[in-house]
Amino acid sequence: MLKISKEIAARFPGVTIGIVQGECAKNAFADENAYLQQARAAEEETRKIANLAEQPNVAAWRKMYRAFGEDPTKRKPSAEALAKRVLNGEQLPRVNALVDCYNLVSLRNLIPVGGQDREKDSWTNGFAVRKGGGKLYPFGRKGNPAG
């Protein structure tokens, strides 16, 4: 069950948060070429964006970050950071089939998408305002245990 703290529900009454749970026996693409075609097409579309910060989904996440006391120009929302990498000429990073797929969804829609291995991670299935402490490891940054 997904839990949203009362504080988040009060501060963002219209926010929609979803969760999808699934299982896969093999974390691999049935058709690697189909994924690559989709990824290159999404990168091409992203490179047409003139002002990333003005995109509605990016602007909404920046607003939410500010409400939580984060500076989105210093620590970008994940979807914005992914799009920025593509705008800077990089391709979508390759990790594994599952991560590659949700990064593609994130890039296409400019929304943060993530995944957790229920057997390896201790994700609490909830959203709350972080009260100091804890480390944030932006993807691709030195020190990120996930890559």
Image (cartoon, grey):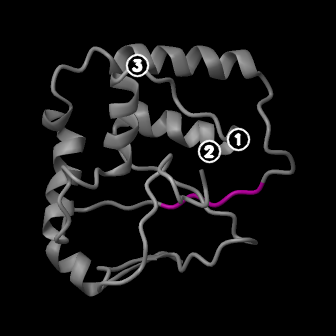
Q: Label 2, on which residue?
A: 99
Q: Label 3, on which residue?
A: 89
Task: Using residue 67 as the reference point, say whether residue 131 is left or right of it.
Answer: right
Q: What kind of residue is marked 1?
A: Asn
Q: Nearer the viewer, mark 1 or mark 3?
A: 3
Q: How dense is the environment of label 2, judged by Cα within 10 Å: few (below 14), some, or many (20 and up)?
A: some
Q: Based on the picture, tell me whether residue 20 belongs to the magenta stretch.
A: yes
Pinpoint residue 142: horizontal percent, then vertical percent. 50, 53
Q: Are marks 2 and 1 in contact (CB under 8 Å)?
A: yes
Q: Residue at x 63, y 61 (%)?
A: 21
Q: Residue at x 60, y 37 (%)?
A: 101
Q: Based on the picture, tell me whether residue 100 belongs to the magenta stretch.
A: no
Q: Residue at x 20, y 65 (%)?
A: 70
Q: What kind of residue is marked 3?
A: Gly
Where does the N terminus fall, quadrant-wise? bottom right
For marks 1 and 3, the one nearer the N-term is: 3
Q: Label 1, on which residue?
A: 96
Q: Residue at x 66, y 72 (%)?
A: 121
Q: What kind of residue is marked 2?
A: Val
Q: Nearer the viewer, mark 2 or mark 3?
A: 3
Of the pair 76 and 144, the residue shown nearer to us: 144
Task: Using residue 135 as the reference point, say whether residue 93 is left or right of it.
Answer: right
